[in-house]
Image (cartoon, rainbow, N blue to C red):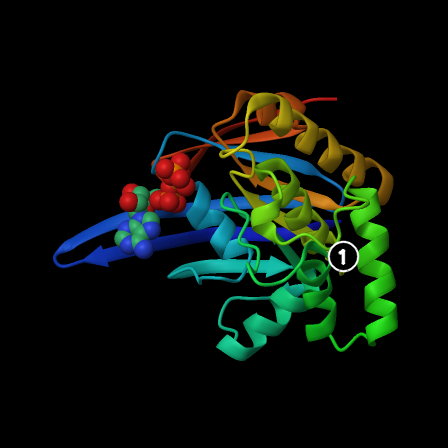
Amino acid sequence: MSIVNVEKASRIYRQDSIAVKALDEVSVAIDAGEFTTLVGPSGSGKTTLLNQIGALDEPDSGRIQVAGEEITGLSRKKRTLLRLWKIGFVFQEYNLIGVLSAQENVEYVLMLRGVPFRERRAEAGRILVEVGLQGLERRLPHELSGGQQQRVAVARAIVSKPAIVLADEPTANLDSTTGAALLDLMRGLNAEHGITFVFSTHDPMVMERARRIIHLRDGRVEREERRP
Ligand SMILES: Nc1ncnc2c1ncn2[C@@H]1O[C@H](COP(=O)(O)OP(=O)(O)OP(=O)(O)O)[C@@H](O)[C@H]1O
């Protein structure tokens, strides 16, 4: 069953008199449980497509459905709720809240969902152990390495059991060993819990671990590869 359905989505950015077609009638369907990577040269539309799937932005034309919901044309408020309940995000720059501990960063999403204190504390603690951060729960982001911060970001993305996790160049700021370990962690979460991941990347290590690679060029799907 498709968890993401993008049908002929186009996105044009206009600046002064110049129009850039960041996405040009892109159609992509992603099934639940897939581990998919978007690759392509700089400016090919990877981030734009992730932002569309993540309901951070809307196409100018075409349709996008995520986890059974039509997201094209949703109000800002409904898009925010969709992101809160259905989508986890991992960004290149980690985007953790600097004044909150690792544990509190992970709990924060559950607090927004109204999960009671004890329950969210227990769940965040459990997920932090799962991503290999036992003992570091009380550290602030600046007291953690880049790889550890990205693990907190992964924990935060998965703690609410979203339908899909979107990761925009998650290993871009990590050295290759740390990046590989992070990728293996996400592959493990994909295999054990069936969490659907979609990455954008320039990193050959990410591509190596993907089961499906979608090549974008000039805002279009150029070709696809599938691996066992
Ligand atoms: N907010 C914006 N305003 C104007 N143009 C934009 C905006 N965001 C993206 N673009 C343009 O849209 C095109 C696609 O950009 P996008 O960021 O999706 O590419 P990308 O494949 O993610 O690139 P990179 O690998 O460098 O991150 C580019 O030509 C870019 O300059």
**Residue in view at x 58 percent, y 34 percent:** 37
Q: Quadrant of ligand 1?
A: top left
Residue 169 visible here: yes
Q: Position of residue 38 (x, y in %)?
A: 52, 35
Query: For this view, does 20 lie left or right of residue 98?
Result: left
Which of these two is toward me, 168 or 116? 116
Give the x, y percent position of residue 108: 68, 67
How many marks do you count on the picture?
Answer: 1
**Horizontal and vertical percent position of residue 173:** 50, 34
State left or right for residue 72 relative to residue 195.
left
Residue 63 in the figure: left or right of residue 68: left
Cβ of mark 1 under 8 A from ligand 1: no
Q: Quadrant of residue 87?
A: bottom right
Helix, strand or loop at disc 1? Answer: loop
Quarter containing the C terminus: top right
Tell me the residue that label 1 is attached to.
159
Disc 1 residue type (three-letter) = Val
Q: Position of residue 44 (x, y in %)?
A: 37, 37
Q: In this orientation, which residue lies closer to the viewer: 24 or 164?
A: 164
**Quadrant housing residue 124:** bottom right
The 10 Å Cα crowd at callout 1, few under 14, some 14 to 19, many 20 or more, is many
Residues 130 and 198: in front is 130
Residue in the image at 58% along x and 44% along y:
167
Q: Residue furthest left?
A: 17
- Which residue shows up at 47% across the image and 28% down it? 202
The reply to whether residue 226 is visible in this rendering is no
Image height check: is 39 above or below 144? above
